[in-house]
Image: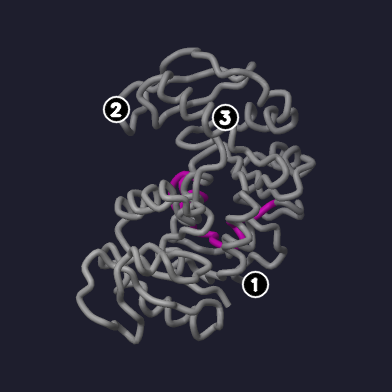
Amino acid sequence: MYRVAIIYTGATYESELNNIRMQELLGKISVIGIGTPDVYAKQIDGYLVTSIEEILMKEWDYLLIAGQESNFAQMKNLLVSIGIQEKRIFSIKIFSIPLFDMDQYIRFINEKVSIISNHCWGGFTYHLLRAEFLSPFINMYIYQEDYIRLLESFDDYMKEEVVYYKNEYEINLKREYPVALLGDIELHFNHYKSFEEAKVKWDNRKQRINRDKMFVEMQTEDEEIAKRFDRLPFERKAVFVPFETSLQSAISLQKINTNYVGAFSASVNSLATEQKPFYNVLNLLNGEKDFYRFD
């Protein structure tokens, strides 16, 4: 059982209270108290209420920050600046992840899993888990043929420097965005306004890749691409496809949702945004076999 202290910075505590109780009933956590900037009572919901300074002096395993996303980032940075390990600071909203398991979450955080993806699924998944980006493949996309070649020679390509190639027009955002080259691979930084901004993010996040704990993902409607992906040597991997298949690494959306609407890539992205949680995300990323939520 993990001893947790709650840092109260907003109304998120109220919306997550039932989830906190469930984790207590499951024997996963024991709440030692709530630290708040404004000590308005001695107790709330049976929990000790005290100042943030006092709650930090108590014995705890993890801190849960109860606040809006902007408050979470601000408080987390403040706590890290005074010497608290980042891996011991969580958003309280993690409890709302479908089938959340504290042990699996701590394992994911401690193993520093790097999600390698050629589209938005990786970034969406990190956001869902309120986890640090440990991959440069964020807020961008790579064409499938380029991506599979990159994965087939991953270590060689990741030694290359990104260089500016051209600008392209993003019809949804109604603006141009930079395209870079990684060797002969096109990187479409469609969520960045300039190549300089994209390169800084790429270079910084590239240094965080944990080569020993990578989860490699892609989506494709091409059976040959899926077969090439399935042959890749990565231990943890998944390719989302819209057709029935016996490929070991494939997750078929035809099996879990025969009526997906719109672009296939958008349907895959929706799996990582709590809209269609057809899999247990922590089990999937941690390499467990029982990640399906259906039969």
Amino acid type indicated by mark 3: Tyr
Q: Is residue 253 magenta?
A: yes
Comes first in the chain, label 2 or label 1:
2
Say left or right for 34 vs 128: left
Q: Is residue 136 magenta?
A: no
User: To which residue does mark 1 refer?
Assistant: 295
Image coordinates of residue 256 in percent, x first then y, are 58, 63
Residue at the location (74% across, 28% down)? Answer: 153
What is the secondary structure assignment of the residue under circle 2?
loop
Q: Which class describes the residues within 10 Å of circle 2: few (<14), some (14-19), or many (20+)?
A: few
Residue at the location (64% across, 29% down)? Answer: 145
User: To which residue does mark 2 refer?
Assistant: 174
Comes first in the chain, label 3 or label 2:
3
Q: Is residue 202 above or below residue 114?
A: above
Amino acid type indicated by mark 1: Asp
Image coordinates of residue 124 in percent, x first then y, are 46, 48
Residue extent of the magenta highlight: 250-270
Comes first in the chain, label 1 or label 3:
3
Which of these two is toward me, 19 or 248? 19
Q: Is residue 181 above or below residue 224?
A: above
Quadrant for residue 231, please give it. top right
